Each structure stands twice: as C-alpha cells, then as structure tokens.
Amino acid sequence: MKTGAQFLEDMSHSRKEVHLMGQKVEQPTQNPILAPSFRTLALTYDLSFDPQAQSLAVRQGPQGPINAFCSIHSGLEDLVSKVQLLRLLGQKTGSCFQRCVGWDALNALYSVTYDIDSRTGSNYHQRFRQFLAQVQNDDLVCTGAMTDVKGNRSLRPGEQADPDLYLHVVKQTREGVVVRGAKAHQTGSVFAHEVIVMPTRAMLDSEREYAIAFAVPSDSAGLVYIVGRQVDDARRLEGTEGVGNDLYGGHESLIVFDDVFVPRDRIFLNGETSYVSSLVERFSAYHRQSYGGCKVGVADVLIGATALAAEYNGTDRAHTIQHKLAEMVYLNETLYSCGLACSTAGTATPSGNFLVDPLLANVCKLNVTRFPYEIARLAVDIAGGLIATLPSQEELENPRTGPMIDKYLRGVAKYPTADRIRILHLIESMTMGNSAVHYLTESLHGAGSPEAQTMMIGRSADLEQKKDLARALAHISQKP
Ligand code: SF4
Ligand code: FE
C-alpha cells in the first residue's frame, strides 16, 4: 500500500493534459486551485496507515493487505464497512474524496465480465482480473467514467447530429480499438492513475460501437481534461482566509477522448449490447449506496459547524434551535440508515462478489437528492444572514476596520470574532460555495439525477405482488 506522499509523487510524474481557466496546467500538483483535491485523495492513502481507521481502510487482497478502495466486496460486511469508511472520510474532509467512483466501477465490471464470459465464452473476466491485480498491487486511483455528454436528449446515440456525443469505437484493429467522445462531470479524473470507461445507458443492437468498456492509463495520448470551474476558486488564489474549507476539496472535469487507442487486453466489453444495462445498473447501485456514506459524513461537519454557530450567536439553548439541530441529525441518520440497509440486503453475484440491493440503493440516493437541501436550509437558518453579508476576512487585519469588525461582529463575548467568522465561512462554503458543489449539486445529480432513481424504483417495485396482498385482505378472488 502507498502513502499519500507516494501518491503525490506518482501524480507529479503524470503527463496528463489538464486545462483550467483557459490555460494548460503544467504541474497540477502545484496548482493552488487543485491542491485541496490532491490532499483529499492523499488522505484515502494515509488512512490505511492510521491505526484508528485501518479496520475500514485496509482489506485482505489475494496477496496481502490492500487499500479498501481497490478491493472487491466479498461479503455483506464489506458492503457495510464501505459505507462506514465513506462516512469517516466525509467527516475528515467535508468534501467529496473522489476515489469511490473507481471502486464502484471495479466491482460492477468484476461481476458483469464474469456474466458475459459464462454465457458467450469470451475472456473479459480474465483480462479484467489482470487489470485489477495491477490496480491492487500498485495501489492505483481509478476514475469511473460513465456519463456521456449526450447532446440532444431526445435522440439516441446513433441519431445525434454529431456521432461523437456518445463515446464510441471509431476503429477496430487486431491490437485493440480507437475511441472518440467525451465524458462529463468526471469526479477525481484529474487525480487518477487509470480511467475506467463504461457506457452511459442501455444500447440497442444497432448501437454496438457505443457498447464499449475499458481502462486506460490517465495520461494516455489523446486524453484531454478540462477542469470545471467552481464558485469561489478565486478565493483559493487569494490565500486561505475566507475559503471555508481550505484543506480539502474535489474537482470534476470534462474528459475528451480524442481518438484514444485502447489495447485489446484492456477492453472489458466490446459490442455485447445485451450486457450494457446490467453494467449501468450495477455501477449505479454501488454508487448510489456510496452516497449514504460520504454525504452523511460531510453533513456531520455541517451539523457541527451549525451547532458552533449557534453557540457563538448565543442561541444554542433556545428550544427551537435544539429542535432544528435534532431535525438535521434525523435527516442525516435516515440517509445513513438507507446506506446500511441496501448493504445488509445485498446478495452474492455469480462471480462471487457482493452487490447491494438495487431498490434500496436507489431509495438511498433519491433521499440524498432531497435531505441535504433541507439540512443546508436549516444550517443557514440557524447561522443567520451574516453568512451572506460577512465582510472579507482581511478586514480583521486592516488597522482602521479590524477593531470595528472585532467589536461589532462579536457574538457571545468569550468567543473570538475571528472564530465566529471562520465557522460562518465554513457554513457559507458548504451551503453556497465550493463545498456546496459536492454537498448539494452533486447530491442532486451525482450518481444519476433523481429521475433516474425514480425510474429504477418504479421498475423494481413489484406492484402485482402488492395488489395480491390487497386483494387477499379485501376478499377479492378474481384477477383481471
Ligand atoms: Fe465518493 Fe461520494 Fe465523491 Fe461519489 S460523491 S466519489 S461516493 S465521495
Ligand atoms: Fe459523485
């Protein structure tokens, strides 16, 4: 297993083509906007050397201990410990820590490649296991690239004005394939060693060239990363004050595949359209489970910050504030319960690894599209309007305005004004700044937007069985 420092060393040698705010970034590890993301990923390594976290962060691999993020779930207790690990990391970072997407992709491909081989006689699973062994031995970060840019949403992949709006194979050779397209919103991609690509939706037989799954090193020729802008990037350039969470953060990018060559031994699905939907559904189920851990940990930080703001404001004893804090906890623990429930109701796949219960994982994620917004609303309610009108932190150092800020923005006398400002900045960041990208927008759209979960819930619900239950109690014997 690697340490965080070894991971950063790896990344300093990467030749990825990264663009940020109109400029090519020559040394991403040194960039002040990207630095919090590198620290977040580094923590996923360092945690495996932390005696307090090792029971969650380290797992037994085929040849010895491995980082949990590279592991295959071999039982229900693994699924549960994943949710616990993600909550812990959310608590420590207050952010998206970006390594779970790849973990979820590894577990989805493990079982789906096995299913394809057992029915078609292909050797995808063997290839995949070779790739997995490399990921485990070298302790690699993988990103899971699923979301195509999709162009006109009312048209299927093959019907788009531009065929590249869904990633597809443009050339097949004996050595491999060449792919072209783009994947949007790719969490952690700039900080990954490997990019694992999967189709974004079920494909028709006529869409075989869009049914492709593979892994390539993240600095392969033709891969271009265009980093998403976040609300207060500029504050990171100003220095640490006022950022809210200056230590940790996360970034997404648009990954363009500009005719990227994929060698044959890195292809895990190529034209088998009938297996695409199970790959999409299994990956989505794992990633929707993940949110019942990571977002819960992030909210633990927000609830703590809100309780501190109440203390600094002198409102912490008020019954209504205590009631609202309890409401925040109830909403958050409901999400955790969903994460645990879909894990304990998981089942073994034919390949031997374990899959979460898909219906409960979708319920988990659908709740995550809603409850964090209410938790954030309560945080802003308790913190007060000052989070939106706070003068710049630098005023505290201004000899003219500093004493005024210190005097007039003090709440309860015993707490320094600077501390009150820091906590308000943290809440500001988590509810409307950089951290809100991951606490709110990502809760809504990450791992699929709410409609995708509602659709899956509708599809998995056995309404006929429920109708039978009702008929039995209502003494109705006739079925239409
Ligand atoms: Fe991991 Fe959560 Fe970020 Fe997804 S949103 S990568 S599950 S931390
Ligand atoms: Fe995500």
Image (spheres, grey):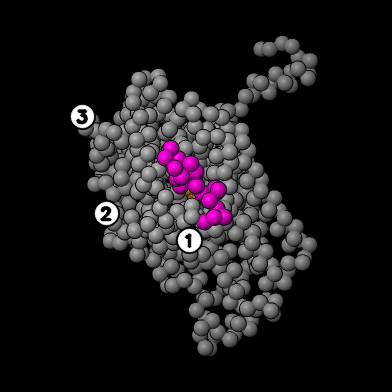
Report if the CB atoms under discs 2 and 1 are less than 8 Å apart.
Answer: no
Circles 3, 1 touching at the beta carbon (< 8 Å): no
In the figure, 43 relative to 479: above or below? below
The x, y position of residue 299, in whole percent, is 60, 55
Look at label 1 and name its amino acid. Answer: Tyr
Sequence-wise first label, 2 or 1: 2
Amino acid marked by disc 3: Arg
Q: In this view of the protein, can residue 8 be seen by the observer?
A: yes
59 is within the stretch colored magenta: yes
Label 3 near label 2: C-beta < 8 Å? no
- The residue at which mark 2 appears reads as 15
Q: Which mark is first along the chain, 3 or 2?
A: 2
From mark 3 to mark 1, how far is it between C-alphas?
Answer: 44 Å
The x and y percentages for residue 250 are 45, 56
Task: Classify residue 60 as left or right of residue 301.
Answer: left
Give the SS element for disc 3: loop
Residue name at image x 35 percent, y 20 percent: 121
Q: Which amino acid, mark 2?
A: Arg
Q: Which residues are magenta?
A: 50-69
Residue occupying image coordinates x 32% and y 29%: 270
Residue 248: mark in rendering: 1
Q: CA distance from mark 2 to mark 3?
A: 27 Å
Q: In the rendered view, does 399 fall on the left or right side of 181?
A: right
As drawn, the label of residue 174 is 3
